[in-house]
Image (spheres, rainbow, N blue to C red):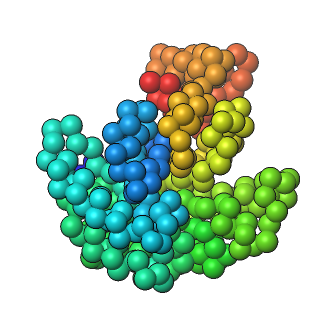
Amino acid sequence: MSASSNQPANKNTSSDTHTDSQNYRAMIKSLADTKTWLFVPATRIDRVEKAFASGADAVIVDLEDAVAQTDKAQARAALKDYYDTQHEAKNYRPIWLRINQADSAEFAKDLTLCQQLPKLAGVLLAKAEQAADIEKIHQQTGLPVIALIESAVGLYRIDEVAKASGLLAFSYGFLDLCNDLKVQVDTSSADIIANQIRYQLILTSKIHQLLAPIDSIYADFNDSTGLHKRVQLWSQMGMSGMLCIHPKQVDVVKQALQPTAADLSFAQRVVAEYERSGQAIFKVDGNMVDAPVIERSYQVLSSAK
């Protein structure tokens, strides 16, 4: 995805402003099938090609948590060198960049780097808390922004942040939020909080016509069973994708998103009957089928492609 051809237009503060730009709507549509967002440390820029080879839909080079404070300048320089040699290649695929939080000393340096990188796909802002920070990134780079909600303040302000010009989507850092909220991780209480966060992000994204939110990382990359269950949870809730921290997670996420044989068979019968009869309401397997069921059946068939 080229940033220059898919820049979201400036938005007003009303909830319908995301519909103002044809390019913005096209970007939302183009990313609807982006399910796996794989992190690569900026100190290991050599892993970008391996990350894409894993089948990840998007690759995020991380200048924030994955890079020690003493290594950030060197990481930026390495990324600039990578772009200088790779961005004109025929097989080049644009990457996303996670930058440091807006109140850090690294933020301005990261923004300068973004301005120097041609064909960058977009920016993830760590610890997003203010609409003004999103707009500053977009105004200075022309790039779409994904806001990472990682603090109580950021979560409290999500409706304000959602109105920012250039905002594409939300994700969240659950471990950071747990630390800030004093929630004990890996408990049933943490699960309740996580689902509440998901619900808030899903609702806010829908109201402001953003891309559906992207779920947080699953830390144990050797636990494919647990990851599979997590993917089914967020996908059933209506989120669009997931942040991944290891290439082996990519296939697990994609497999977990495939409809079951029973769901696929039912969807096929619903669509076949709808297209045969043209009726708005009918029965399949003794179940009443109306517009929402028909729409969902088309979604199931699309997800199986």
Nearer to us in this view, 209 or 242: 242
Mark count: 0
Name the spot of residue 84 as percent of width and height, x first.
17, 56
Left-right relation of 6 to 127: left
Up-down: is 53 above or below 216? above
Up-down: is 46 above or below 179? above
Up-down: is 289 above or below 107? above
Work out which quarter of the rendered image holds the C terminus and state it: top left
Picture quadrant of residue 106: bottom left
Nearer to us in this view, 152 or 269: 152
Residue at 71%, 23% (x, y): give it. 287
Q: Please say whether residue 203 is visible from this viewpoint.
A: no
Residue at 53%, 41% (x, y): give it. 246
Left-right relation of 96 to 218: left
Name the spot of residue 179 as percent of width and height, x first.
72, 69
Residue at 22%, 57% (x, y): give it. 81
Q: Please say whether residue 85 is visible from this viewpoint.
A: yes
Nearer to us in this view, 127 or 46: 46
Name the spot of residue 269 as percent of width and height, x first.
57, 16
Name the spot of residue 104 as percent of width and height, x first.
47, 81
Nearer to us in this view, 244 or 191: 244
Picture quadrant of residue 236: top right
Picture quadrant of residue 119: bottom left
| Furthest residue in direction right, as rendered | 188
Residue at 44%, 50% (x, y): give it. 40
